[in-house]
Image: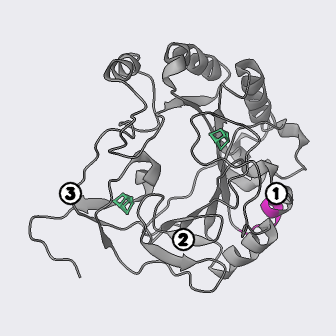
Amino acid sequence: MSRPVEAIGPGGRRLAVILPSLLCNYDCPYCRIKAKRRQPGERPLSAWQQALIGIGAPLVHVAGGEPTVLKGFADFVLGYPAPLRMTTNLWRPPEDWPPGFWERFEYVTLSFHPDSAEFEAFAARAATLAALFDRRAALRPRLTCTIVADPRWIDSLPGWIARLRVLGLEARGQYLNRPVGDPAPVYSDADLARLRALGLPMSSDQAGQEAHEDRPRLCDAGMAYCHIDPTGAARRCSRDRLSLGNLFDGTFAWLDGERRCDTACTEACDRTFARFRPLADGEAVA
Ligand code: SF4
Ligand code: SF4
């Protein structure tokens, strides 16, 4: 049992996925975004907090990089006035954070990266985090362990997922993503078939390299869901470039309606939060 997560979208909350920095303490070879230094133009978390409050304090999912390595992260978490979500590699023992820290989250994705972490250490930290809420299950954030389904360890995935489930944790695989049409796909046909044959729970039905619906669509991403990069530039999702302005210069604005999209949509766009439909042949969009 865990606390309920808020509904996102019409009638529910707005969700901003923020990447305050791409800084990460791990060095996963498949990662296309990590940075070993903070980049020019990145702002302190206090500035993010203030700016997010300025746009109405949406529910925030803090991603990265690894957000927990950022200076002032605990203060940001404890001081932000709306529920939070986070993706973390769980490098730091959960009990090392100050009182009240984990209670601020409604949803935490715990991502296991075998190049940088030992499975048993990761599983032990995830179990410790869950156990912090043993007598307060109703306050426990929803915890989901994800394991990148790198072709190198496809055969180990079932055992890892089973072990996490024995510990009472949700666990699933996650396809490694490459943009649709990337000339160097992550999976060979044989690897993908082998992975599928395992019948594991996965974060998405389709691997990122597979073609998703690519005809023009009408999509509501940007009305209640957005993606904000380290410079504050906001887009309606992680793939489409339609701008919502910048969080830090007063130009940010949620979209007031659906917009056409011609971008190849993948799992990484957070399709969970976007409602879209293919445009009919010849259908005009305002
Ligand atoms: S933990 Fe995540 S952000 Fe860090 S290097 Fe690995 S995949 Fe990239
Ligand atoms: S890429 Fe997908 S989620 Fe993003 S705007 Fe287009 S249809 Fe919506």
Residue drawn 67% across the image and 79% down it = 248
Quadrant assignment for the N terminus: top right
Q: For mark 1, what is the residue? A: 73
Please give the count of numbered marks on the rendered protein. 3
Residue 134 visible in the current orientation:
no
Residue 241, located in which quarter of the rendered image? bottom left
Residue 109, located in which quarter of the rendered image? top right
Q: Quadrant of ligand 2?
A: bottom left
**Disc 2 residue: CB within 8 Å of ligand 2:** no
Residue 74 on image: x %, y %: 84, 56
Work out whether residue 76 or residue 207 is closer to the camera in this orientation and state it. 207
Tell me which numbered mark, 2 or 3, is placed earlier along the sequence.
3
Neighbour tally class for label 2: few under 14, some 14-19, many 20 plus, Cα within 10 Å: many
In 3D space, how far apart are the residues under numbered discs 2 and 1 (Cα atoms)? 21 Å
Q: Is 219 rendered above or below residue 87?
A: below
Q: Which mark is residue 174?
A: none
Work out whether residue 265 or residue 2 is closer to the camera in this orientation and state it. 265
Residue drawn 78% across the image and 66% down it = 45
Instruction: Tell me the mark number nearer the camera, choosing from 2 and 1.
Output: 2
Quadrant assignment for the C terminus: bottom left
The three-letter amino acid code for the residue at tag 3 is Arg
Which range is magenta? 76-81
Work out whether residue 193 or residue 94 is closer to the camera in this orientation and state it. 193
Q: Which mark is residue 234?
A: 2
Q: Is 152 rendered above or below residue 186?
A: above
Q: Residue furthest bottom?
A: 250
Q: For mark 3, what is the residue? A: 215
Based on the picture, tell me whether residue 78 belongs to the magenta stretch. yes
Look at the numbered disc 1 and give the secondary structure of its residue: helix
The three-letter amino acid code for the residue at tag 2 is Ala
Tell me which numbered mark, 3 or 1, is placed earlier along the sequence.
1
